[in-house]
Amino acid sequence: MTAMQASVISLEEIERAFAAGADLCLIEDWRIVEPGLLGPLAKRFGPDRLGLMLSPGEGDAPDMLARACQAVQSGIGRLFVPWKENRWCAGLASHVPDARIFAVFLSEHGWRPDDLAGLVAENFAGAMLDSAEPNRAHLLKHDGIVALHEFVQACQAAGLSAGFAGALETPDIARLLVLEPSFLSFRGALRREHRRQGVLDPEALALVRALIPRKNFPREPSISGEDEMIAETGKVDWRLAGRKMSEDEDVQGGETDHVFVHDLILPMSVGAYAVEQKAAQRVRINVDLAVQRITHHADTIRDVFSYDLIIDAVRLLLARGHVSVIETLAEELAAALLQHQRVFRARVRVEKLDVIEMASVGIEIIRKRPVGTRASRPLLTLSETAMSETTSGKGGG
């Protein structure tokens, strides 16, 4: 299950973030890392929920090692270090054996399988993909859903946790949850006017919290009865997530929305003939979904099923490699979209545009989820071929 991580710069922000339901806090201001200041909070919330971003720009290697040790002594259990500055990362884990260490990769610089092997060799716990200063390019726009999926899969294959940062916004959450990262890290999205230097906004914190299922971390005694129920059962109000509804809701009752993506034309490797396996051809995809409406008036991202989820599903399927027949693509796309509990009917039309001059050929299917059933298929996975072809950390989108 994916954790919500809040980037914070003060002791007060740590208190406010945890009170609002954050699973983890990532401290970005070294000045508050003092045993006398941080110790009580670490004891209260647990060191495994507190992280610190260590920047090599703040000092040389010996200084960074000293700060890492002081951070752990202060009660911090998670350390984040930029991997591009790995000259001082060697042996770091041996100095702080009680801490979990995460490498930070910048999407602009990419990552390689050798990097992940290096993390394993250095006993790191995981990796986080972020975007560089000063512009902090939006991660999904820079890398795309396929490249981010590859990052998660590569980390998991290496036995590492994978997380995302990079100017994440609330519309990104449902899309990234599909990839099952270990955590999503937010800063600007939690603050007034979405400014990185702004103050924490209670409404923004509540919105992000509502969109991510809760992990089983201890909750504060001050939380509401409803939140306490969710924390104890591990359930979440999926109505707010734009992906699924709660387990007990009948997705085929009430009002229905028609969410669609039409005339999406993409190149793909498809076809049973040998010539079709040598070059990509254009495919046009149309998707129409019957989606359970959860409110009479849709005002925010919490109230809608995003068409981005449809496009992401298409791109993830195409990234798996060659498909012999378009019927396979249509069936797998319908099945993937029916994983979302709010979706109870999918119409998928796939057309090959380059087979016959002056015409298109293809198939249209309609698939429904039987009443009372819930999707249980695993998430889409990229083929080994697709994984080996793109290892730089950049890809489709």
Image (cartoon, rainbow, N blue to C red):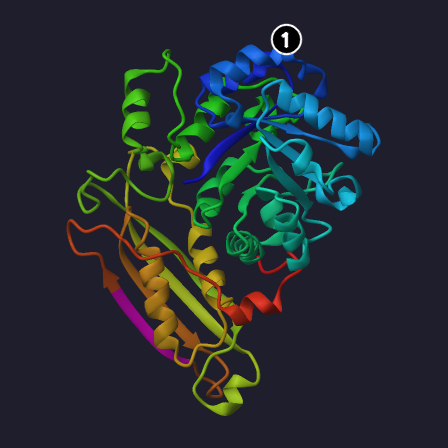
Q: Is residue 362 magenta?
A: yes
Q: Position of residue 295 (x, y in %)?
A: 29, 34
Which quadrant holds the C terminus? bottom right
Q: Nearer the viewer, residue 163 or 367?
A: 163
Residue 21 percent location from the top left of the image: 43, 23
Determine whether, in the image, residue 167 is placed left or right of residue 334: right
Relative to 278, is 262 on the left or the right?
Answer: left
In the image, residue 195 sits, relative to residue 287, either above or below, namely: above
Amino acid, disc 1: Gly
List the single residue furthest toward the left.
Answer: 371
Residue 165: x %, y % from top left: 60, 39
Decide: is 41 above or below 253: above
Residue at the image position 67 percent from the left and 17 percent from the top = 33
User: Where does the magenta region start and end?
Assistant: 361-366
- Mark 1, residue position: 36
Q: Is residue 388 above or below residue 353?
A: above
